[in-house]
Image (cartoon, rainbow, N blue to C red):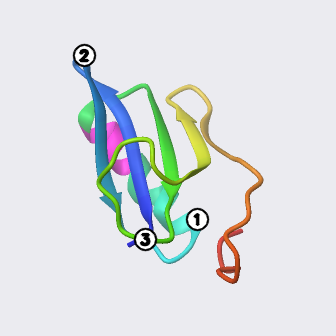
Amino acid sequence: MPFYLEYTVHGMSGVRSAVPGETLDEAAAAAADLLRESGCQTGLLRWSPAPSEEPGSGEVVATYTDTVGWEPLDFRRGAEDNVK
């Protein structure tokens, strides 16, 4: 699973969770559900070519706020071109 959600909840920073999804849209939908369930107001969706539980690793592909929703960022992930 190359997508990871990072967020802060109840003052605990650096929370990183693997997110299911083959595309950015699928991962963003799953991540938004996690953010709503945890009561978070902001989050980052990252893509990493290799599994990693290290917060901060991977490329930020979208940002989330509870007022705007997901804002995808322009990024490249090599031959993996199914994320749009």
Mark in the foreground, 3 or 2: 3
**Circle nearer the N terminus (3, 2):** 2
Prevailing secondary structure of the magenta residues: helix
Q: Which residues are magenta?
A: 33-37
Residue 46 higher or lower than 71, as above or below: below
**Circle nearer the N terminus (1, 2):** 2
Q: Residue at x 50, y 29 (%)?
A: 66
Instruction: Measuring from the top left, give residue 38's x and y in whole percent.
Output: 25, 35
Mark in the foreground, 3 or 1: 3
> Are the residues flagged by discs 3 and 1 in contact, CB closer than 8 Å?
no
Which residue is under mark 3?
A: 50
Residue 56 higher or lower than 9, as above or below: below
Q: Quadrant of the C terminus?
A: bottom right
Which residue is under mark 2?
A: 11
Q: Residue at x 72, y 48 (%)?
A: 73
**Circle nearer the N terminus (3, 1):** 1
Badge 3 crowding class, 10 Å Cα cut-off, few under 14, some 14 to 19, many 20 or more, is: few
Residue 63 higher or lower than 77, as above or below: above
Task: Give the secondary structure at mark 2.
Answer: loop
